[in-house]
Image (cartoon, rainbow, N blue to C red):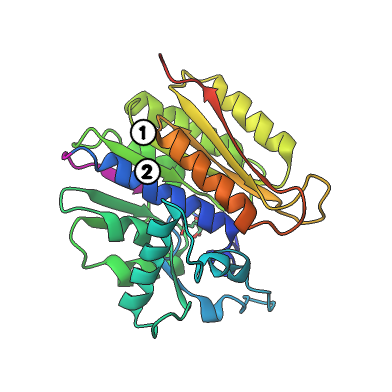
Amino acid sequence: MNYRHHFHAGNFADVMKHALLGRLLTALQRKEKGFLYLDTHAGRGGYDLTVAAQGDTLARAPEYPQGIGRLWARPDLPEGLAEYVALVRKFAEQKGAPDDTLRYYPGSPWIAQLLARPQDRLVFCEKQPDERERLDLEFGRAARVQVSALDGYGAPRALLPPPERRALVLIDPPFEAQDEFARVARAVAEGLRRLPSAVYAIWYPLTERARVDAFFAELLALPLPPTLELELTVAGEQSALKMKGCGLVVINPPWQFDGEARRMLDWLAGALAQEPGGRAKSRWLVPERA
Ligand SMILES: C[S@@+](CC[C@H](N)C(=O)[O-])C[C@H]1O[C@@H](n2cnc3c(N)ncnc32)[C@H](O)[C@@H]1O
């Protein structure tokens, strides 16, 4: 396993994922009662974009200029995305970046930590020892945060249902292994058995449509509560780009999240397009009950 999120930090896929994650967390906070935020594949927590181009063995073109870089200075951010960029700015300030410099970018753990209330609890699972060490450095002393070496796919079995009986589970694996979609489906099945009312948000890359369709078929074979599929493509089907887009499956989306997400994605499709043919899509895989 040689995946490092560093190279991808702040790219278009992170923008979509983290902006929607922020809205999910905020929606769960409409209720006073605290909840568990479980990040099954947490990464290192936050990223210094100045090293985003340094690979383990190769130099790479950083991806954030085509992602957060496109939103950073926009004065016309719509609702949802304005809050997301404000969070990124808050993180940058905490890390000590000079005003208006896009140098630091928060991963999903920091997005959650910046929004969490005292009654919310955060568990971050990360398998890579050096990434987990960074997580420990960032959050080791934070109240209500636990950094865990648990295998992310086993985390739903180990940690659900939580005492709070409320949870948001982000499943965001590297999708390096051939069986990654199948492992996600099994983890979701286990999670649903243990806490059917939790919100599960599953990120996936749009590299091969057939694999995504097979994944949906696996999900639909489960006793699946209302489930929303959200997608953003930055190029058309025929593009040579390896990752033309990405998606987020949201099981048990909060009330009115579908409309909010749709408006955000429609705007992002324009702002983040890399080639003609990019678009936003949202559809219910399992519709909301009337
Ligand atoms: C896409 S990155 C996570 C990015 C992070 N969620 C964010 O949005 O900032 C995937 C991470 O999962 C880690 N990982 C891979 N397999 C894992 C497993 N079985 N359990 C936990 N973490 C794993 C990788 O080391 C990598 O840091």
Disc 1 designates what residue?
Answer: 254
Q: Is residue 60 magenta?
A: no
**Residue 115 drawn at (x, y percent):** 28, 56
Confirm whether residue 39 shows in the render.
no
Tell me the CA gap for discs 2 and 1: 7 Å
> Where's the N terminus, which quadrant?
bottom right
| Ligand 1 under 8 Å from disc 2 Cβ | no
Which stretch is magenta?
32-38
Q: Which mark is residue 24?
A: 2
Where does the image place residue 34, in percent across and percent down from the top left? 19, 42
For the residue labelled by badge 1, is the local secondary structure a helix, a strand or a loop?
loop
Report if the beta carbon of the residue with label 1 is closer than 8 angstroms to ligand 1: no
Look at 61% across and 79% down and name the residue there: 54
Q: Which amino acid lies under the numbered mark 2 shown in the image of this protein?
A: Leu
Task: Pick the quarter of the image with the C terminus.
Answer: top left
How many numbered marks does the figure carry? 2
